[in-house]
Image (cartoon, helix red, strand yellow):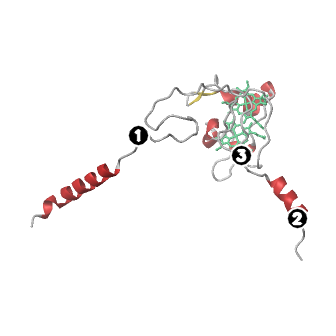
Amino acid sequence: MNFRLLPLLLLAAFGIAVAAEVNYPLDAPAPDGRRPGGTISQSLPPPPIANEENKDLKRERNYPEQPPTIPHSISSYQLDKNGNQCLTCHSRAGSARSQAPMISITHYMDRDGQALAAVSPRRYFCTQCHVSQNEVQPLVGNSFENIDTLLQNEANAPTKT
Ligand code: HEC
Ligand code: HEC
């Protein structure tokens, strides 16, 4: 028997199996999320782009290691390989001029925990970790409880004997 055609045959059989499997009901209702209503195949107009929250009020962090969310608009700030406008306000020197909080020491550390003279390259693209917020209602609920609540609950719980 000629086995040279075997891989080709297997590939063809696999292709047919896959093609047979793809049989989405195109008029099924779409999941209600960002785009409520309509069917899976239907194009609906996207919701309007929400405003960026710009209240300048720092938000509580859920745990100390959390990168704080950005309490101001960033839509006009350049942040690419040619320039970092965040640092004009948030760098060590810039924070005195702008009264913005200085980036913390971790932003100057390399991956071995060694403090560098300038901002560490791995902390250069700020929006990898820090995000601004939009004026919208959350799409899904959230039952997160922070450590203060957990400790409080534990203290209030009846003691085991
Ligand atoms: C014009 C100066 C300026 C620029 C540019 C700027 N910020 Fe800010 N930022 C501030 C000030 C001032 C605050 C303090 C809160 C406030 O007034 O909004 C702040 C607050 C923050 C905070 C909150 C810190 C905390 O402790 O809660 C983060 C995070 C932040 N900025 C990130 C950024 C990032 C990322 C960029 C670039 C995309 C940026 N900022 C650009 C001035 C600036
Ligand atoms: C790899 C993730 C990461 C990147 C990238 C990053 N940060 Fe942060 N940032 C954090 C974390 C985590 C914290 C909170 C804990 C800490 O200070 O390390 C923080 C804290 C801060 C704070 C609050 C400091 C304080 O003492 O309260 C400011 C302001 C800030 N970052 C600004 C920036 C700016 C501006 C950039 C870009 C130059 C940037 N960050 C890049 C993770 C990041």
Amino acid, disc 1 = Leu
Labels 1 and 2: the sequence-earlier one: 1
Quarter of image, res 133 = top right
Q: Are marks 1 and 2 in contact (CB under 8 Å)?
A: no
Labels 3 and 2: the sequence-earlier one: 3
Labels 1 and 3: the sequence-earlier one: 1
Q: Residue furthest left?
A: 1
From mark 1 to mark 3, how far is it between C-alphas? Answer: 50 Å
Quarter of image, res 51 = top right
Residue closest to the eye, 158 or 125: 158
Amino acid, disc 2 = Ala
Location of residue 3 in the rendering, given as x and y in whole percent from the top left corner: 14, 64
Q: Residue furthest top?
A: 76
From mark 3 to mark 2, how far is it between C-alphas? Answer: 37 Å
View quadrant of ligand 1: top right
Q: Residue at x 74, y 50 (%)?
A: 144
User: What residue would you read off at disc 1?
Assistant: 26
Label 2, ligand 2: CB separation under 8 Å: no
Relative height, residue 35 to residue 64 (above, below): above
Label 3, ligand 2: CB separation under 8 Å: yes
Of marks 1 and 3, the one in the foreground: 1
Q: Residue at x 72, y 34 (%)?
A: 70
User: What residue would you read off at disc 3?
Assistant: 106
Residue closest to the eye, 161 or 38: 38
In this image, 102 relative to 75: left or right? right
Location of residue 79 in the rendering, given as x and y in whole percent from the top left corner: 60, 29
Q: Residue at x 45, y 32 (%)?
A: 42
Q: Secondary structure at mark 2?
A: loop
